[in-house]
Each structure stands twice: as C-alpha cells, then as structure tokens.
Image (cartoon, helix red, strand yellow):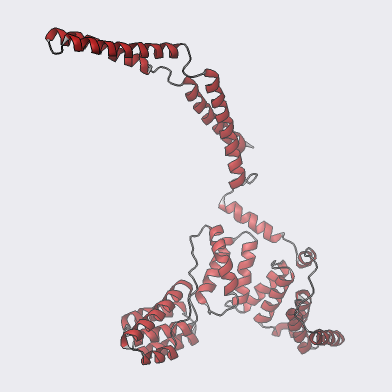
Amino acid sequence: MSFWIIISALALAVAALLGLALARGRAGAEPAAAYDLRVYREQLRDVDRDVERGVIAASDAERIRAEVSRRILAADAELRAEAAGAGQPRALTLGMGLALGIALLAGSLALYNALGAPGYGDLSLERRIELAAEARASRPGQAEAEASLPPAPPASGLSEEYLALLAKLREAVAKRPDDLQGQLLLARNEAASGNFAAAAAAQAEVLRLKGDGAAPQDHADLGELLILAAGGYVSPEAEAELRAALAGDPANGRARYYWGLLEAQTGRPDKAFRIWEALLQEGPADAPWLGPIRVQIEEMAMRAGVEFALAPEAGPGPSAADIEAAGEMSAEDRAQMIETMVERLSDRLASEGGPPEDWARLIGALGVLGQTERAGAILQNARQVFAGNDAALAMIRSAAEQAGVAE
C-alpha cells in the first residue's frame, strides 16, 4: 500500500508544479508591450536630437515621428488589453492545469499497470530464491498434473493392424507382468501411439524388474515419459527419475535438458540457462534436445538477465569428400570454396560447440589450407572443451597429426 501512496504523491506533486507554472504564466515578468513603449519613446527623443544636430531633414523627421507614434499607440493598446485580463483567461489556465494533473496521474497508473507488476512486492534475490524453493517443494504431483489435462485425442496415423497388435501386446503383458522384454516393448509402443501415461507405467515396471541393475538411461526414459504424460510439466516423480539418471550418468544429455526445464518451471531461469547453454556448446549437432533448447534459450536468458543471442544455425563444415572434389576446380575457386566452408564450421563451433568429429574436421581442413598456426589454436581450444573425454581427444589428436600441428 505504501508503494501506491508514494507514487501517487509524486505524480500529484509533479502535476501541481506544472499547474502552478501554467497559472502563474508570466507573473513578475514585464509585458512585451511595455518594453516596446519604452523603445518607441526613446526613438522619438532620438529624432528630435537628430533634427537639432542637422543629421536628418525636418520633412523626414515628421514622417518618422508619425510612424513611431503609430507604433506607440498600438503598443499602448496591447498593454491596456493585457492589464484588463484579455491576454490569458485564468479559468482556462486553471482548467488546463487540472486536466494535465489528472492525465499525468491516470497515465502513470495505467502505464505501471501495463508494464509493471501490480501487487508484487520488492523482493531481494535471496528472498526470490527462497520463494522458488518453496514453490518447487509444494508443486503438484504427477497424478494431479495428469488429471488437470483434457482428454488426449485419439492417435492419428496408426493403422488398424498396428492397433490390433498393440492390443494383443497389452493382453500378453497383463498376463505376464514380470516379462521384462514384454514391458520394454509395451513402453516403446505405448509411447509411439501417444499414450504416454501407459508408456510411463510400463517403463516403471521395467525399472522394477531390473532393480539395482537399472541403467541411468532407464531412469531418464521414465522421467521423460512422465513429463510427456503431464503435458511437459516436470513433476516431483519425474524429478526423482531425472536425479537418479544424473547420479549414474552426469553427462546424460536428455536428463540434463529436462533438469533445465525443471529449473525454468520452478523460478530459476538462471540455472536453466546455464544448463542449456552448456548442452549447446557440447553438442552433438544432431542431439534431439538441441532443437527445443534453441527455441527456448533466448527467452530463458532474458528472464535470467543475461545478454545472449543465439547464433544462426550453420551448415556442416567441409568433409574429406568436399575437399577431394575441390581438386577438380581451379586453384582460386578451390581455395574460396574451402575457405567458406571452414569459416562456417569455425563460427558454429565457436558459438555453439559441436561433436569431436567437427573439431577434428576443422583442424584437418585448416591443415589443408596451410593455416597451421590457426589449426594449433583450434587444437588447444578443443583440448579444453573435451578435457577428460579420452575418445574425443584421441580423434582430435589424430586429425592434428595429419594436419602437422600435433605436439
């Protein structure tokens, strides 16, 4: 309430100052007509002095006196009109001041209502984080989320034969619930038919049957199916599966993407942006989670208060076949083609990252172009990106040896 009192008082104060300025007008200032009168009378005296000194003729002096006198009469009439109040009506001035004050106050409130956050208190960062944690802890569960969704439309594009086979699969699994292979097939086919709730139930059975032998990807699959069944909402049950997947495989891209989605949904866009940005840098370029990330990451950066612009997607860099085909071109055309593809690949890796194959390809292409110094710099960068990934480093080292830049 104090916020509204303060801004209303400020708006009224500004409106009062503007209205006072309008009401006072030029109070205390000399009217322009009075100044003109003094000038014209001084001009008459100058004419008399010029006649006495013989500077101007008597006939010219009479003509000048007549013109100055006419101006004196006009200025005197204007001064009398201002003194009588005919210059600026006071009622109109006060009305304009009042209208201006109302417009300023109403406009300020309307602008805040459209662009501000009425009813939202001023919160410190620490308090905002606490509220996000509280909202995360008290959010709805999986069953409540699924119940809030409208009925799913029947799956389209499925043949009658496929639906008949799916029905038989359901009957068979119902009779043999401990058949691991049957539960795996049922989870896969229920998901393919768009029945994500049933697919999640079958995947939960897979985890039950595997027990301690369940792989991180099994948990990630169940987490994804729960999220899809809830219409994209990451429930506490889905969070538990994602946590289990990341505990066993911290590099699991699918689980990390959905973990970022969880952070975004629970008031932590800063964490979501960091997770998604790292996934973009790591690649690979054909990872299924990169598409959804590219769609959402700029908005997430804006919500996190981070300046971020997503680089446009670039095509793949030059392959060995591309470079070999360039051998049939003229030297100038060949160099231009390779240089263009190399720059495109280099820009993409610098802005988005990519799989080790692309880094190795870039190093090899730079070696072909004779840009060994630049290839060495790319090699050092790649080593930092893939530190700890022995397979990726071996691939990059092999490309560096062929390019002649291996240390």
Question: Eyeballing the image, is 13 above or below 312?
Answer: above
Let me know if residue 135 appears in the view.
yes
Q: Which residue appears at 37% of the width and 13% of the height? A: 74
Going by the image, does 234 lie left or right of 88? right
Please determine whether, in this image, residue 167 is positioned above or below residue 312: below
* Left or right position of 92 against 62: right
Q: Position of residue 172 (x, y in %)?
A: 85, 88
* Residue 6 seen: no
Tally of marks: 0
Q: At which x and y percent is residue 244? A: 66, 75
Q: Nearer the viewer, residue 97 or 146?
A: 97
Which quadrant of the structure image shows residue 79? top left
Where residue 297 sits: x, y (%)? 56, 66
Q: Residue at x 49, y 87 (%)?
A: 391
Q: Looking at the rendering, which quadrant does residue 337 occupy?
A: bottom left
| In the foreground, 174 or 156 | 156
Q: Residue at x 41, y 87 (%)?
A: 397
